Image (cartoon, coloured by chain):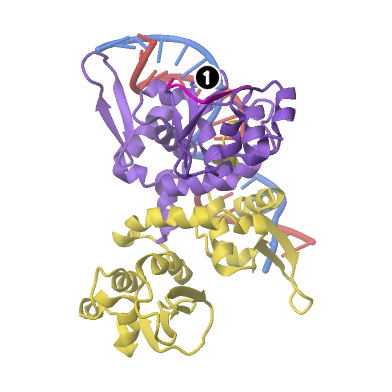
Chain colours: A purple, B yellow, C red, D blue
Amino acid sequence: MRSYSQYCAVAKALDVVGDRWTLLIVRELMLRGACRYTDIRDGLPGIASNLLAQRLRELEGAGVIERRDAPPPVAATLYELTVRGAELAPALHELGRWGIAYIAEGPAVDDEFRSRWLSWPAEQFLSDHEPHKPPVRLAIDTGQDPVAIEASAGEVRVTVGEYAPADATLTGSPHAVLGLLSGRLDLKSARERGLEYRGSTAVIARLQPLATT
Amino acid sequence: MRSYSQYCAVAKALDVVGDRWTLLIVRELMLRGACRYTDIRDGLPGIASNLLAQRLRELEGAGVIERRDAPPPVAATLYELTVRGAELAPALHELGRWGIAYIAEGPAVDDEFRSRWLSWPAEQFLSDHEPHKPPVRLAIDTGQDPVAIEASAGEVRVTVGEYAPADATLTGSPHAVLGLLSGRLDLKSARERGLEYRGSTAVIARLQPLATT
DNA sequence: CCGCATCCGGGGCGATACTG
DNA sequence: CAGTATCGCCCCGGATGCGG
């Protein structure tokens, strides 16, 4: 992108990550950790292949990401955030906080979805209301990669891609799941929209007390 | 901008403010408060006039800014952030924090500068090291609009456009001023680069103890 | 299959001129 | 002062191809 040529921190930041797709590439690497070209592209439906390659070059040149060869068994190139790149987390987080208002409106008809994108809403909407109790784990199944939400000692964390056992399982469309997590829907209404909840209701009650009515 | 069509908070936020120039328009309105078309354009050197008009329309449509007619004496249109627009402050702030690394490198040869852009570096580099003492005010003159940095009860705040009396005055180029405030230059080195400091050195010592060596 | 490069059509952007 | 009008260019989207 053409530089703004402004001696201002915000403008300089946008010179580096202000291009179209760029911050979404950083988001993918932040949520998935080191991954391949194809994995990144899967998280950016609609991006032109050459454009992704170009952005990755630019980000590497700017010191935001690093290219690394995967260990011998699999021949693949891995991309991952550098320390400098990981420092974009607060900015991305705040941008997501601001954008959460549009998530609450529900998805547009042609909106794509990846289960790992649940991270922001989860951290935004949920909290551990019973920090003194032992950790619990809520598995979420939206038909894609498994996502788990853990409440432990007052903290809520989201993990992606692990099939570890959980205390309860939530199955349904992204919109129904988010409706429940955000408190827009209670468990009964969410069930009417095809959401299925298995396990102790104490788990969802701990994360989101409004849900179990 | 073409929508990313992703059911993700970050992508939705970028759908609204991810266009080129858009976040810089928000920055200007955040730093200056309500101001006119021409004032905004002054803070965005190089923007095409039609693009600014288009962006303002889009931002108004998205509920980020509001258009308002100035009171009778002056016939002018004023733009200002809505509550929703003001909520972008944390995101912009974090983006600026990330970009401050590029400010420390000094300006590029053709970089533009506006004194009000000092806000981010000031909040980033300075703190009130003697919170128990009475408030002090440091005026900064880079040849443009007056900027003042106030230390009061442990807080550092920046005000723009006011000519109130100050306890000390800093005069010089943006780079020299920032060099001093960031601690990259001490008072002696900064003076060799054309910076002039008038008033008690206690003021700068309170804000930036490393400077007075 | 992975990681791109190439080609082409369309639209966003930059620069300048002009107007109520 | 607050935009609109115009034009050329480059960036982007979409499809295809291709070497490792």
Residue A72 point in image, percent of width and height:
21, 16
The residue positioned 40% from the left and 46% from the top of the image is: A88
In the shown orientation, is residue A1 left or right of residue C9?
left
Q: Is residue B36 above or below residue D18?
A: below
Q: Which residues are magenta?
A: A163-172
Q: Which residue does the image show at 46% across and 49% down from the upper left?
A: A91
Residue drawn at x 53%, y 26% is: A114
Give how far across and how far down residue B93 sits, in percent: 47, 58
Q: How many marks?
A: 1
Please report the residue visible at 29 percent of the width from the left and 18 percent of the height from the top: A76
Looking at the image, is D12 positioned above or below residue B96?
above
Q: Is label 1 in a helix, a strand or a loop?
A: loop
Q: Dot 1 falls on which chain?
A: A
Q: Nearer the viewer, residue B139 or B135?
A: B135
| Mark 1 Cα shell of 10 Å, populated few (<14), some (14-19), many (≥20) | few
Q: Residue B75's x, y, as percent? A: 75, 73
A15 and B126: which one is in front?
Answer: B126
- Check disc 1 and give the amino acid type: Gln
Q: Which residue is mark 1?
A: A144
- The verdict on residue A12 being magenta is no
Check residue A167 for magenta coloring. Answer: yes
Q: Quadrant of the N terminus of chain A?
A: top left
